[in-house]
Image (tube, rainbow, N blue to C red):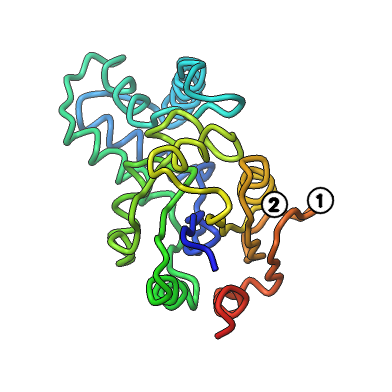
Amino acid sequence: MYKNYLFDLYGTLVDINTNEWKASLWKNMAMIYSVSGAPYKPKEIRKAYDAYLQDEIDAVPKEKYYVYPEPLIDNVFRRLYSEKGVEYSDEMIKYTARVFRALTIKYIRLYPGAKELLDAIRAHGGRIYLLSNAQRSFTEPEIRMLGIYDEFDDIMISSDEGCAKPDKKFYECMLKKHDLDPAETIMIGNDQNTDIRGSYEAGLDSLYVHTNISPEVKGELLSKYTIMSGSLIEARKALFGE
């Protein structure tokens, strides 16, 4: 029996389909910025977004990560305004980020059995932590909307830490913050590399759930438990025999 359960979010608890490459997204973002006094053409704003995002990746302090830096996307939205001479507030940036994210989403929903798995962990006295490669400005509103924000003892998001799974440092951030014993901790995720190999290198057991958006499994799958059906109901049975 484990005491601590680390969860990946997207693809593990949450089924999501997004598209940041569709032309309509950049057409709408160009309009949003333009009506705010920052005139952009669709191709122009997409090119600027990509360039500023790379700048943010390059600017992450090297002491924050070993291999995988994670930028703060809010800084990209700020720069898109400032490069056009537009003053902005923090609330304006939050709104812009949420609109951008909403425009990319085709659907978002909990996987069947997600809430029941979290409830089972609680019933067995476990603590629940979220370790997600994501942007706080996108993810926090979404998990609140889905009704699971309060299910977690702590939420650690890569954009806050400057590093991302499978970087060992991201796992270490959570382990050190809460003084978690690796022998009492398991990672639950749907990605062979970021969730399973990453947790293995951090000294953790893992449970791999193969969902509809899991990358193709290549090579050895270093998980103690493997649920190839993608069912969180089966994951609950593997952990608790129920």
Q: Residue 30, relative to residue 54: is it above or below?
A: below
Tell me if 242 is positioned left or right of 26 in this view: right
**Element marked by disc 2:** helix
> What amino acid is at disc 2?
Gln
Q: Quadrant of the C terminus?
A: bottom right
> In x, y percent, where is residue 149?
30, 59
Location of residue 145 by image quarter: bottom left
Residue at position x 63%, y 44% in the image: 203
Q: Are marks 1 and 2 in contact (CB under 8 Å)?
A: yes
Which residue lies under the disc numbered 1?
A: 218
Which residue lies under the disc numbered 2?
A: 192
> In x, y percent, where is residue 151?
33, 64
> What amino acid is at disc 1?
Lys
> In x, y percent, where is residue 10?
50, 56
Q: Nearer the viewer, residue 24 or 147?
A: 147
**Element marked by disc 1:** loop
Could you say which disc has been placed on residue 5 in the image? none
Q: Quadrant of the N terminus?
A: bottom right
Q: Which label's residue is closer to the chain start, 1 or 2?
A: 2
Residue furthest right as drawn: 219
Tell me if 141 is positioned left or right of 10 in this view: left
Q: Residue 78, relative to residue 131: is it above or below?
A: above
Q: Please rate how many residues cluster around mark 1, counting C-alpha atoms within 10 Å: few if below 14, some from 14 to 19, many from 20.
A: few
Residue at position x 51%, y 58% in the image: 17
Residue at position x 45%, y 36% in the image: 173
Q: Nearer the viewer, residue 237 or 139?
A: 237
Q: Residue 182, relative to residue 70: is it above or below?
A: below
Location of residue 31 by image quarter: top left
